[in-house]
Image (cartoon, rainbow, N blue to C red):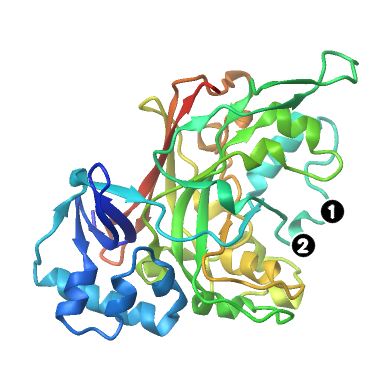
Amino acid sequence: MSECYPYGVAVGRGGDGPPRVVVRVGDQALDVGPVATEMSHPLAAELSAPTLDPLLAAGPDAWRDVRRSVLDWIADEPPLTWLDDLDLLLPFTVADYVDFYTSENHAVNVAGILRPGRPGLQPNWRHQPIGYHGRAGTVVVSGTPVVRPSGHVAGPGDDDRPSYQPTAALDVEVEVGYVVGTGSTLGKPVPVSGFEDHVFGLLLLNDWSARDIQMWETVPLGPFLGKSFQTSVSPWVVPLDALAAARVPVPAAGSDLSPYLVETEPWGLDLDLELSINGEVVSRPPYRTMHFSPAQMMAHLTANGATLRTGDLFASGTVSGPDRDQVGSLLERWRNQRYLADGDEVVITATAPATDGSRLDLGSVSGRVVTQR
């Protein structure tokens, strides 16, 4: 399997030493700050920082220069550190978090379950990427325990009185997230052609969901406490330049779209994701089936003049394919549905095609459910 050399931030096992920027090389990592300093690299200060924030803000020319340098440094076989000797941290400061809803398969599946007999998609769905604002402060790094949240859930039958209780329907959402590097100007939309100028890379994401809380609160304003308690992300950010062989058109490319959503280059991605619970693979969602691309998500996010900021995170929404073994949430498993129990460990992994015909390992995001204290 080829390497994509993603970026992360780590300390020594047990919290030893200050945080530093690292690049993953298989089961090991390169500490890039000391190498950059020794080589008098012009971005040595950014690569010696305790987060990826300065590198993200440096812009696309700097990202490409650093990646070329990293590839050269790795080719020289520098000393590496085993990942088992490191604790990986949240690699950047999350400025804002937006979650989209861009899988047609997921949207139709959920509509059939929650609104049987009614149209599967709302009239606006194919015309724009639908999304909602989440909470940046509850985005956590992979491995952080997931405390079962409480909230209001519907009463039995026709009882309008809800009960406040721990969720009995804790779910997962297999997603891909995108990390913004350079910001934009208030009042100035960013076109789809600006995707590579503003987005640094991607990571894997689990948008944990409390379905019973979500269903009671969603009318009329949408997701809130059923989503905001925690979102887990991979510690590794894969640079866009590593994904050249994975790019594919999306279904929306052939749609009648407003001009600001029409792509000049394809930015769908041919990623294979995998969802495991307690070591058992329960689903393999294909990201290539997503209706909208991340470039279209970014363009829609800023279409009203809203800004991008360094560290913004936006996510694809649940990734689901057309088959029942390709769904990205437990809600969609119909009669085989089982929501998460305390002690369950969820792991999401993904691969992408490499230029040499092999597969790139995009890392993983995990979390174990614990009882609410």
| Residue 354 occupies quadrant | bottom left
For the residue labelled by badge 1, is the local secondary structure a helix, a strand or a loop?
Answer: loop
Residue 326 x %, y %: 52, 38
Quadrant housing the C terminus: top right
Q: Is residue 219 left or right of residue 243?
A: right
Q: Which mark is residue 163?
A: none
Q: Is residue 222 left or right of residue 7?
A: right
Rendered view: 133 above or below 256? above
Q: Which residue is mark 1?
A: 123
Q: Which mark is residue 127?
A: 2
For the residue labelled by badge 2, is the local secondary structure a helix, a strand or a loop?
Answer: helix
Which three-letter amino acid code belongs to the residue tagged 2?
His
Q: Are marks 2 and 1 in contact (CB under 8 Å)?
A: yes
Measuring 57% from the left and 37% from the top, which residue is drawn there? 208
Q: How many marks?
A: 2
Instruction: Name the foreground residue: 57 vs 99.
Output: 57
Looking at this view, name the residue that lies furthest to the front.
Answer: 17
Instruction: Name the foreground residue: 78 vs 138.
Output: 138
Q: Is residue 34 visible?
A: yes
